[in-house]
Amino acid sequence: QHSADAPPVRANQEFLRFAASVLLHTDPARHAILYDLLWRMQAKPRLLSDASDPVVRRANLLAKAVGRDIHKMRAFVRFREVLDTDNTPHYVAWFEPQFAILRANAKFFVGRFASMQWTILTPIGSIHWDGAALHEGPAADLSQAPADDPAEDLWRTYYASIFNPARLKVKAMVKEMPRRYWKNLPEASLIPDLIAGAQAREAAMVSIGSDAFAGVAEPESLSDVAAGIAACKRCAIGCNGTRAVMGRGPTGSPLMLLGEAPGDSEEACGLPFVGPAGQVLRRHLAKAGLDADALYMTSSVKHFKFEHTTNQATGAKIRLHKNPSPGEIDHCRWWLEREIQFVNPRLIVALGASAARALTGRTVSVTKMRGAIKPLTTELSNGRHMLLTYHPSYMLRINGAAREEAEAAFAADLARARDWCATGGDIKA
Ligand code: URA
């Protein structure tokens, strides 16, 4: 009972955040636990830091279980593509959370899949993103979710190809992917066979035959290319749940800068070259008198390839960049060629070996080929030339004299590209 002249009940931000998480648990004692904590916090505001308090300990366990469920939903939601009546793709996923985490996770999915239209159906409610606004809907059952789609074969192929039974630790795997989640994961159907097979497999990304693009309608504009890339699931990176990062800049720009693949920051913003390597690049462009907004920047592969790891210094979980494989670069060339067609640059500066591979289809040594302007010989060349230079991230990996040397070479290459474009390509290659 709280009488009118009693002092007001106080709760700090930490408690409010903590309580919001504990309340998502299904434990029937959760309200009583929070009441007890709030009541005692009036006299002992730092109660939550007392790890020896049994109620604090119990509440921590509830919050931790909720946090784990939130994480598992982020990792294990698998969208299936369905076509709306107007033929636009709509992505629908079925997920069974353990706790009431749906609303708490909505913002994450909106951020991650902002450019898609999607619905997540769960037994406790549904959320729907139409590209502009989020709507909540009623609880659903599995029969409302679409059945298998071709992308799931890809997931299975991918999962089978990265699965290495030689390094199999069943206990650790089940901890990461609890059996509860298995039944709704396409790849999980493979697990018993993969374990039984117990054959060391190369942990390679799936590489799909070039006929993956057979029958795909030719894009009619750069925005068709962007839409196609955003929905592309023809390789394992395209299926990893990250958003695609399309190139940016004016069409008709005589100069295109071609990198490797978006990184963590690019994926977060949906824009190319905004992360640490992008900063190096932009600094050099400014120094060379090149307006970054007046040229076209893109990457050879349009999705962020990464592996989850822990930062040794801070303990934070991070997404560590991984280089796309030659197969993945070759695969994504289908899109790059069309992007080049619409932008129609005269000179493409290939930033690093992956970009050189994307343009030539061959493995090229940056050290040997750097700095020369060469005509492109692929069928889309159309009089276009390429200049190979370092990827700006290279400068971030070296120090001292080596870095100074690389920066000077990079600056000279950009100046050469600038002059070649400015003089209509008259400078001797
Ligand atoms: N490297 C790239 O190749 N592209 C980006 O967008 C960022 C870094």
Image (cartoon, rainbow, N blue to C red):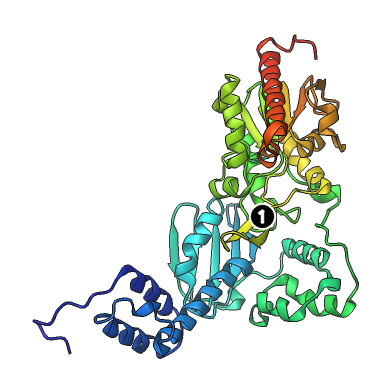
Residue for point 86% across, 51% down: 209
Where does residue 280 sit, x and y in percent of width and height? 60, 34
Where does residue 199 sit, x and y in percent of width and height? 91, 72
Q: Residues within 10 Å of mark 1 (few under 14, many from 20)?
A: some
**In the figure, residue 377 lies in which quadrant?**
top right
Instruction: State the residue in front, 128 or 154.
Output: 154
Query: Which residue does the numbered mark 1 point to in the structure image?
Result: 320
Q: Is residue 126 above or below residue 368?
A: below
Taking 318 as reference, is 43 left or right? left
Residue for point 27% across, 74% down: 11
**In the structure shown, which secondary structural element does the residue marked by tag 1 occupy?**
strand
Q: Is residue 313 above or below residue 295?
A: below
Where does residue 162 sit, x and y in percent of width and height? 80, 64
Which quadrant contains ligand 1?
Answer: top right
Taking 343 as reference, is 274 left or right? left
Q: Is residue 83 visible?
A: no
